[in-house]
Image (cartoon, rainbow, N blue to C red):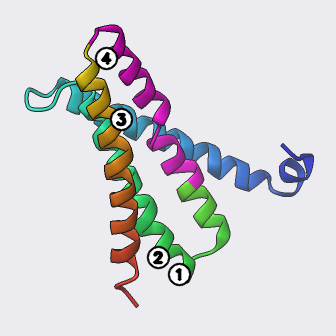
Amino acid sequence: MDSFLFVAFPSRLLFLLLAGGLGVVSRFLLSAWLNESAWCGKPWGILICNLLGCFLFGLLTAFFTRWTSPELKLVILTGFLGAFTTFSSFMFDTVELLEQSRYAAALLNLLLHNGLGIVMVMAGLMLGKCFP
């Protein structure tokens, strides 16, 4: 990281840290709850977090281009949603499925995350553009 960022914008880094922490905790709690629920199960918790995060990213990007400062956009999109939508957990879950020789489930997991993730970002952007 550029030292200028640390010296000139220490509050920006603090807000990124706090927003990232909230994103991580939110993802963990939602994913754990979904993974433990009788109707969901692993790896659906991370899938739902990623899809929700993709939708929110699109929606908020559309809103932020008109209604907010670049600093708030950075904190929410990079901090909170960057920590909330983690593809590292998604990849780990996919590898676990492959190691269990559940190839169809691993492929379905990849297709759903990537295919529906694109659809959800587009849906969020389109919905966000509907508001003045």
Q: Is residue 98 magenta?
A: yes
Residue found at x 57% / y 76%: 68
Between the C-alphas of marks 3 and 1, the distance is: 34 Å
- Which image quarter is the C terminus in? bottom left
- Nearest the viewer among 88 and 131 is 88
- Nearest the viewer among 34 and 121 is 121
Residue found at x 56% / y 78%: 65
Residue 28 placement, left or right of 12:
left
Between the C-alphas of marks 2 and 4, the distance is: 37 Å
Q: Position of residue 105 (x, y in %)?
A: 24, 25
Q: Are marks 2 and 1 in contact (CB under 8 Å)?
A: yes
State the mark number for residue 63. Answer: 2
Between the C-alphas of marks 4 and 3, the distance is: 11 Å
Residue found at x 33% / y 76%: 127
Between the C-alphas of marks 2 and 1, the distance is: 6 Å
Q: Are marks 3 and 1 in contact (CB under 8 Å)?
A: no
Q: Tag 3: residue type?
A: Leu
Pick whichever of labels 2 and 3 is earlier in the sequence. Answer: 2
Pick whichever of labels 2 and 4 is earlier in the sequence. Answer: 2
- Which image quarter is the N terminus in? top right
From the image, state whether disc 2 or disc 3 is nearer to you: 3
Between the C-alphas of marks 1 and 4, the distance is: 42 Å
Q: Tag 4: residue type?
A: Leu
Q: Residue at label 3? A: 110
Q: Give the extent of the magenta segment.
A: 78-101
- Nearest the viewer among 45 and 93 is 93
